[in-house]
Image (cartoon, rainbow, N blue to C red):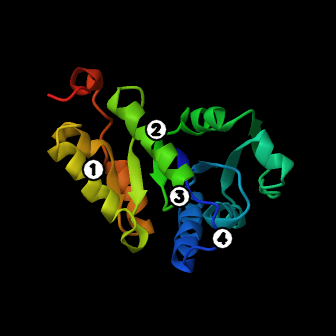
Amino acid sequence: MRVCVYCASSAHCDRVYHEAAAELGRTLAAAGCTIVYGGGAIGLMGALADAALAAGGEVVGIIPRFMTEVEWQHPGVANLEVVEDMRERKHRLLTGSDAVVALPGGSGTLEELFEALTLKRLGLYFNPIILLDTNGFYQPLQRFMEQVVEQRFMNRDHLAMWSLAERVEDVLPAIRSTPRWREDARAYAAVR
């Protein structure tokens, strides 16, 4: 299974997020999953990759060229794909993935997550999207998305586009238990 992981490069956030990223890296490696991530060496990205590599996992990094010019890439990731820009990076991260896992993060992580959700809503991506809700990080987003539905910007059906996993050990079961998104997603993409 190829799992796309969106995660932050911040080295300054609470250590609980770094620990969860490392635990996810070990868990996915132990399950034989290929991790595809943003290719960075620090923050949650570094913790994820370091732990997965130490556990013998396969890690693919996809990083824009400008980030390599300032040496943000992970030196231990042998399979590092350098792309031209952020747009191509997002496309390559998602293409061919069997699931998406979003760890806590900032604007970059949220942008990637929302693009995946939008593509799912439009029937262009059909696989599970799991938000690792470490320390309740995604609770405000969950409430906001429920408000989006309540105020008729999305349909109630769209709340099933993602799942929250409270703990790392819940991620793989959540991926495995999530059914493929409906092939007729475009038929109900617009608000009804």
Say which residue appears at 40% left-offset and 69% top-offset. 167
Mark drawn on residue 188: none
**Amino acid identity at mark 3:** Gly
Mark 1: secondary structure: helix
Instruction: Write down the residue under mark 4.
Output: 11
Instruction: Write down the residue under mark 1.
Output: 145
What is the C-alpha distance between the residues marked 1 and 2?
A: 15 Å
Which of the image's four quarters has the C terminus? top left
What is the C-alpha distance between the residues marked 1 and 3?
A: 17 Å
> In front: mark 3 or mark 2?
3
Q: Quadrant of residue 55?
A: bottom right
Mark drawn on residue 115: 2
What is the C-alpha distance between the residues marked 1 and 4?
A: 28 Å
For residue 130, side relative to residue 53 (left or right): left
What is the C-alpha distance between the residues marked 2 and 4?
A: 24 Å
What is the C-alpha distance between the residues marked 3 and 2?
A: 14 Å
**Amino acid identity at mark 4:** Ala
Tell me where residue 118 appears, x and y as whole percent.
Answer: 39, 35
What is the C-alpha distance between the residues marked 3 and 4?
A: 12 Å
Q: Is residue 22 visible?
A: yes
* Mark 1–mark 4 CB contact (< 8 Å): no
Instruction: Write down the residue under mark 3.
Output: 106
**Amino acid identity at mark 2:** Glu
Say which residue appears at 15% left-offset and 46% top-offset. 150
